[in-house]
């Protein structure tokens, strides 16, 4: 709390805290003499008051009352950080999964210059078939609003940056490597005579496993999440019927296509889910006790 200080002194206090603690700072002010301090902080919050709008115009966020800071930090700040971290890492995982499948496919078949998924399949994977469920993660909410306000100490865990770190990045990378290896190895184990058929099985298993990955990361279901999952499944089903140059329609109607795709998706996604459940039991996260209660 800076009182009876010049604008330069207030900014110096913020810079000193950043330099000596290494922490991210949030500067809050309501007047023109707080602008320098707000600009010096990592995040600036301006309060619209009797002293004018200079602070709110220079800040990253503007509120009308000081009491709104509780909701801004504990609820919106918490949700924004968790959603951004999950979305960023899931987008990276989605791209790595497709890349690892291509790398393993090329390595197994003596580095032949042939893409596993061609044309519209490659484009549709990131634009139509998985984009809506992945981006629906921004609607996820770990804990209800009442619980977050009741236990403000939950905010302490966010300051450690555990949701977005090198550890979590490599965890998602290993997940991508495992699922890619599981999908391509099972596809070769259940190899079909036609290359078009193996592409159909592999790509279908890839889409199913990715949709299941999204579902397993959700804490609180929203109607838009359910709609996005169903929409993606519907779009892919329509593609199976319309993209004649990529799939064999006669093979798609067989029981072999259905059970092989389901088995590959289960092998790719099942162990990941089991690991998450076991880890939650052995090392439960901080919020789990509140959810269970």
Image (cartoon, rainbow, N blue to C red):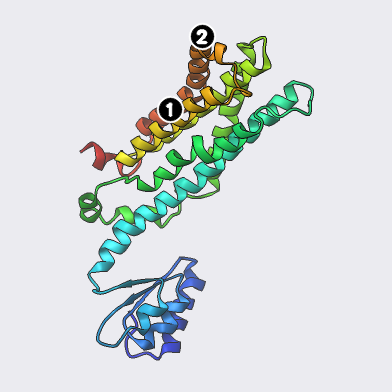
Q: Distance between the residues labelled 2 and 1?
A: 29 Å
Residue at left 25%, top 68%? 68
Q: Name the residue under label 1.
A: 273
Q: Name the residue under label 2.
A: 254
Q: Position of residue 43 (x, y in %)?
A: 42, 69
Q: Where is residue 84 in the image (x, y as percent from the top left)?
A: 44, 52
| Residue 284 visible at all | no
Q: In which quarter of the image is residue 102?
A: top right
In this image, 50 relative to 25: left or right? left
Name the foreground residue: 283 vs 134: 134
In this image, 16 relative to 150: left or right? right
Quarter holding the C terminus is: top left
Mark toward the start of the polypeptide (2 vs 1): 2
Q: SS for tag 2?
A: loop
| Residue 161 visible at all | yes
Q: Position of residue 100 (x, y in %)?
A: 64, 32
What is the crowding at mark 2: few (fewer than 14 residues within 10 Å), some, or many (at least 20)? Answer: few
Name the foreground residue: 64 vs 233: 233
Quarter holding the N terminus is: bottom left
* Relative vertical location of residue 233 with respect to residue 128 in this rendering, above or below: above
Q: Position of residue 154 (x, y in %)?
A: 31, 52
In this image, 64 relative to 44: left or right? left
Residue at left 70%, top 31%? 103
């Amino acid at each position: 709390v800076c009182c009876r200080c010049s604008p330069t002194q207030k900014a110096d206090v913020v810079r000193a805290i950043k330099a000596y603690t290494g922490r991210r700072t949030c500067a809050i002010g309501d007047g023109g003499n707080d602008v320098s301090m707000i600009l010096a902080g990592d995040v600036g919050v301006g309060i619209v008051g009797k002293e004018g709008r200079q602070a709110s115009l220079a800040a990253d966020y503007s509120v009308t009352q000081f009491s709104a800071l509780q909701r801004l930090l504990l609820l919106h700040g918490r949700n924004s950080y968790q959603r951004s971290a999950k979305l960023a890492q899931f987008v990276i995982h989605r791209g790595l999964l497709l890349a690892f499948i291509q790398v393993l496919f090329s390595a197994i078949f003596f580095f032949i210059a042939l893409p596993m998924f061609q044309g519209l399949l490659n484009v549709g994977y990131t634009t139509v078939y998985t984009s809506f469920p992945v981006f629906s993660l921004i609607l996820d909410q770990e804990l209800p609003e009442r619980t977050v306000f009741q236990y403000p100490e939950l905010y302490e865990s966010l300051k450690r940056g555990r949701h977005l770190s090198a550890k979590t990045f490599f965890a998602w990378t290993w997940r991508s490597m495992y699922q890619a290896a599981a999908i391509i190895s099972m596809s070769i184990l259940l190899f079909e005579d036609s290359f078009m058929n193996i592409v159909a099985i592999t790509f279908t298993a890839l889409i199913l496993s990715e949709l299941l990955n999204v579902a397993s990361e959700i804490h609180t279901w929203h109607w838009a999440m359910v709609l996005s999952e169903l929409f993606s499944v519907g779009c892919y089903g329509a593609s199976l019927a319309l993209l004649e140059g990529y799939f064999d329609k006669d093979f798609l109607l067989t029981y072999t296509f259905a059970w092989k795709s389901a088995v590959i998706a289960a092998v790719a996604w099942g162990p990941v889910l089991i690991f998450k459940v076991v880890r939650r039991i052995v090392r439960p996260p901080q919020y789990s006790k509140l959810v269970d209660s």
